[in-house]
Amino acid sequence: MRTAGRTVLFSALTVAASMACLLVFPQQFLYSMGLGGVLVALSAGIVALVPLPAFLYWLGPRIDALAPRRLQQLPSGGRWGRLAGWVMRRPGRVAAFSASVLVVLALPAFGVHFVGVDATTLPASASARQVAEALDRNEIRGRYAPITAIMNSPPSRAATARLATTAGVAEVLPARQVTPGLWRLDLLPVEKGLSDRSQQLVRIVRAELPAARVTGQTAGFVDQQASLGAHLPWALAILALTTCTLIFLFTGSIVLPLKSLVMNVLTLGASFGILVVVFEWGQGLQGLESTQPILLCATAFGLSTDYAIFLFSRIKEGRDRGLENRAAVADGLERTGRVVTAAALLFCVAIGTFATSGISFIQELGVGTAVAVALDATIIRALLVPSLMALLGNWNWWAPAPLRRVHARLGLAE
């Protein structure tokens, strides 16, 4: 508890803060995932700090009684320390190579296309997908996804005629009264409901009939995209601010939080680029589900920062014991290498089971998160972090004098 309790506390708070950024979105499924993530992270932290030590005390030497004798021995060999030493003897080249690999992996993300959830995301055996594909084969794609305008009075003939002659419109059905004081006008697009041209038709209908409320699959997707775009800056701001604040309170440095942000962006970009290669280029999907960047950012960002806190804590302990910067980095990587690798492997196995789902957007979430965690546990933690720590030296722990006084006054040091 003396050496790991503070680390566990800040790790739980970091993951909870990352998931809390989803609470700014009004979409219920994002809000509920954010709330669930916050509760799980905080609950796990409480369990690790309160009942777990009592349970370990009760077990005593029996904790590894059933393990093979080889696994009961303390780890030896210093493999992670030797790796850190090898990296820090050539920090510039390793940092440039690691960053270049991540940037190259991220390049396909610039050509990403976003789509909504429709019947094509279901397994091939699902009847809804079979019907949708049959309609596509018969070139009546838009018939099952009309753009519907609801009005308090019938639309003018001129507006209806202009909509009927708009490019991409297959047919405009006659307006009909569905209840006293409420009229409905259905427009059938030529292309699929989530295509770019169908989305443009929604905007045209809204401009042509400003008093109408436009609904349907296409309009719902357009509105969802607008809502996600409006709330995304707030979510990113919360994510960056809370992460930087917690890492600063933990380490007393403002360089390490900023460096963590940059490395997390590289990790997310690379994992998102791999998603594009696997699902758009490999499986031939028209695009990735539109909420994937948000879910991937919240989940992978929190876990990456969690692993960074474990590493920074051991490096800081080494410095506090009087070790020189490079020796402290090697000591920290040696102490956390096995633990973080095991944690990342366990998480990849757990979240990787999502890749076996028959629903494409669940597959995307599983593959993307597993790839992000794997990249963070290998390229980032084993190569990029020690190389940058060696390059920056004592600047890693720099903070302005006022912030140093705030950190000291809060009494958050070990």
Image (tube, rainbow, N blue to C red):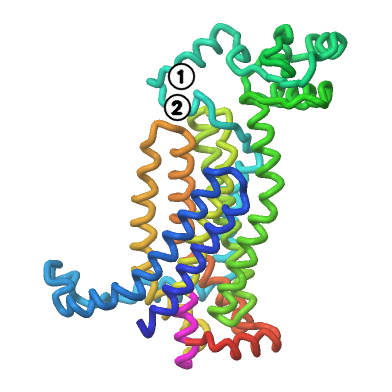
Residue at 59% x, 57% y is: 21
Q: Does residue 383 show up?
A: no
Left or right, 370 with respect to 169, comes to left
Q: CA–CA distance between discs 2 and 1?
A: 8 Å
Amino acid at the residue labelled 2: Leu
Q: Which residue is mark 2?
A: 122
| Residue under the image location 60 percent in, 57 percent down | 265
Q: Relative to residue 53, is residue 73 drawn left or right?
A: left
Any part of residue 347 in sight: yes
Q: Main secondary structure of the magenta part?
A: helix
Disc 1 designates what residue?
A: 128
Q: Secondary structure at mark 2?
A: loop
- The quadrant holding residue 100 is bottom right
Q: Earlier in the sequence, mark 2 or mark 1?
A: 2
Which residue lies most toward the front here? 180
**In the rendered structure, which segment of residues is drawn in magenta?**
312-322
Given contact means CB atoms under 8 Å apart, are the residues at marks 2 and 1 in contact? yes
Q: Is residue 314 magenta?
A: yes
Whether 329 is drawn above or below 379: the answer is below
Q: Is residue 311 above or below residue 220?
A: below
Q: Residue, x 79% and y 26% (percent of image)?
A: 206
Q: Nearer the viewer, residue 365 or 151?
A: 151
Identify which residue, 303 or 372, lies in the foreground.
303
* Residue 24 position within the rendered picture, expressed as x and y whole percent measured from the top left: 62, 53
Residue type highlighted by circle 1: Ala
Q: Say left or right for 176 vs 321.
A: right
Outermost residue on the bottom side: it is 322
